[in-house]
Image (cartoon, rainbow, N blue to C red):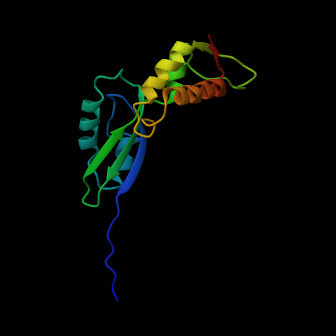
């Protein structure tokens, strides 16, 4: 009774700077350990993200197939990154709720929600729902929303 084992696809999640993928960590070791040539991924990723401001952190989901071929999805930058950029701050509050490090307007919230709506897992949600989520994230990093 021998069972044929079939290798499954492997999912690798990385945070990579736009246009800045290189075989150095975290990309090289994460892909090399799974038998994928990291240079192939880097070329494709950098080409796909060349229109985005360099170094913008982009969550990337890489699917590696048993034959060592891969595909990847690039998501929008993290909400906290977009909020800090809009507020002009470099880091969030050390005590969220008690400390305010910056402020954004509702227009900023709406624009960030429009960017986040491009992600496949948020496409079906109304803009108002995504906006409320962005406001929640703003509060958790110490960024005040002003009208």
Is 9 situated above or below 117?
below
Residue at figure coordinates x 61%, y 13% from the top left: 103
Give how far across and how far down residue 132 sits, in percent: 59, 27
Residue at figure coordinates x 70%, y 26% from the top left: 96
Asked which quadrant contains residue 17, the reply is top left
Q: Closer to the camera, 3 or 113?
A: 113
Residue that sits furthest to the bottom in the current view: 1
Asked which quadrant contains residue 42, the reply is top left
Residue that sits furthest to the top in the current view: 147
Instruction: From the viewer's perspective, tell me whether residue 101 is left or right of residue 34.
Output: right
Give how far across and how far down residue 11 sits, in percent: 39, 52
Instruction: From the viewer's perspective, tell me whether residue 62 is left or right of residue 44.
Output: right
Asked which quadrant contains residue 72, the reply is top left
Q: Closer to the camera, 93 or 37?
A: 93
Is 49 situated above or below 42?
above
Quadrant containing the C terminus is: top right
- How many numbered tags mark residues here? 0
Quadrant containing the N terminus is: bottom left
Instruction: From the viewer's perspective, tell me whether residue 109 is left or right of residue 65.
Output: right
Give how far across and how far down residue 4 sits, in percent: 31, 78
Give how far across and how far down residue 19 sits, in percent: 31, 28
Residue at figure coordinates x 36%, y 20% from the top left: 53
Residue at figure coordinates x 38%, y 48% from the top left: 29
Instruction: From the viewer's perspective, tell me whether residue 79 is left or right of residue 135.
Output: left
Q: Closer to the camera, 84 or 113?
A: 113
């Amino acid at each position: 009774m021998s069972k044929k084992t079939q290798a499954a696809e492997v999912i690798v999640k990385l945070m990579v700077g736009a246009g800045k993928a290189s075989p150095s960590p975290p990309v090289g070791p994460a892909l090399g350990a799974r038998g994928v040539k990291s240079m192939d991924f880097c070329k494709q990723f950098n080409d796909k993200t060349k229109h985005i401001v360099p170094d913008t952190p982009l969550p990337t989901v890489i699917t590696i197939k048993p034959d060592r071929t891969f595909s990847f999805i690039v998501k929008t930058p993290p909400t906290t990154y977009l909020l800090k950029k809009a507020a002009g701050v470099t880091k969030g509050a050390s005590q969220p709720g008690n400390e305010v490090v910056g402020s954004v307007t509702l227009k900023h919230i709406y624009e960030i929600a429009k960017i986040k709506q491009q992600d496949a897992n948020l496409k079906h949600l109304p803009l108002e729902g995504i906006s409320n989520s962005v406001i929640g994230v703003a509060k958790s990093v110490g960024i005040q929303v002003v009208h």
